Amino acid sequence: MAEYPDRLKDTLADFNFVTTRSERAELLIDIAGRFEPVPARIATRPYAEEYRVPACESDAYVWSERQPDGTLKFHFAVENPQGLSAQAMAVILDETLSGAPLEQVATVSPDIVLRIFGSEISMGKGQGLMEMVRTVQRHARSTLAEQAS
């Protein structure tokens, strides 16, 4: 199994040092503050259903854009303005997986959600965030399959 991209390993390591729930919340709010919605050159409202993340309470969408080096740049929309967790997850996935080797992106476990958000995350929110990871995985796997054929 391929290793995680270094940027993701570094981010997960940062969360290992978080000791309190309030510290985790503060860090995630700071990360969510860096969220930038999908650029209009990629997609405009209303977004196509095929890009919607299943089971996401925050109504998130994921797109990928192939880069000249064969990697992907990920773009996200989070339609619920209160969806700070989904926004934070989108920032983390973009900053750590965009431009990473597709073999590594394809093997990222949805369990990173628990490492980032903590085990006390609600089941509904956790499932939606895990689906964001799975959606990014699917984009990487699909691109790998296209490159192989």
Image (cartoon, rainbow, N blue to C red):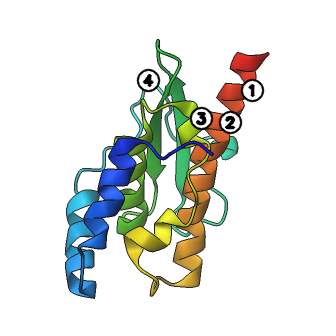
Where, by quadrant of the figure, is residue 141 drawn?
top right
> Badges 2 and 1: C-beta atoms under 8 Å apart?
yes
Q: Earlier in the sequence, mark 1 or mark 4?
A: 4
Identified at 24% across, 50% down, the residue is 34
Residue at mark 2 to residue at mark 4: CA–CA distance: 24 Å
Frontmost of labels 1 and 4 is: 1
Identified at 58% across, 58% down, the residue is 109
Q: Earlier in the sequence, mark 3 or mark 2?
A: 3
Of 113 and 74, the residue lying toward us: 113
Residue at mark 1 to residue at mark 4: CA–CA distance: 25 Å
Q: Which residue lies furthest to the right in this view?
A: 149
Give the amino acid type for the residue marked by disc 1 in the picture: Ala
Identified at 51% across, 26% down, the residue is 65
Q: Earlier in the sequence, mark 3 or mark 1?
A: 3
Residue at mark 3 to residue at mark 2: CA–CA distance: 8 Å
Q: In this view, does 6 lie to the left or right of 100?
A: left
- Name the secondary structure under disc 2: helix
Identified at 56% across, 32% down, the residue is 102
Reading the image, the residue beneath label 3 is 103
Give the amino acid type for the residue marked by disc 3 in the picture: Glu
| Image quadrant containing the C terminus | top right
Q: Earlier in the sequence, mark 2 or mark 4?
A: 4
Q: In this view, does 22 lie to the left or right of 43?
A: left
Residue at mark 4 to residue at mark 3: CA–CA distance: 27 Å
- Name the secondary structure under disc 4: loop
Reading the image, the residue beneath label 2 is 141
Reading the image, the residue beneath label 1 is 145
Frontmost of labels 3 and 1 is: 3
- Name the secondary structure under disc 1: helix
Residue at mark 2 to residue at mark 1: CA–CA distance: 6 Å
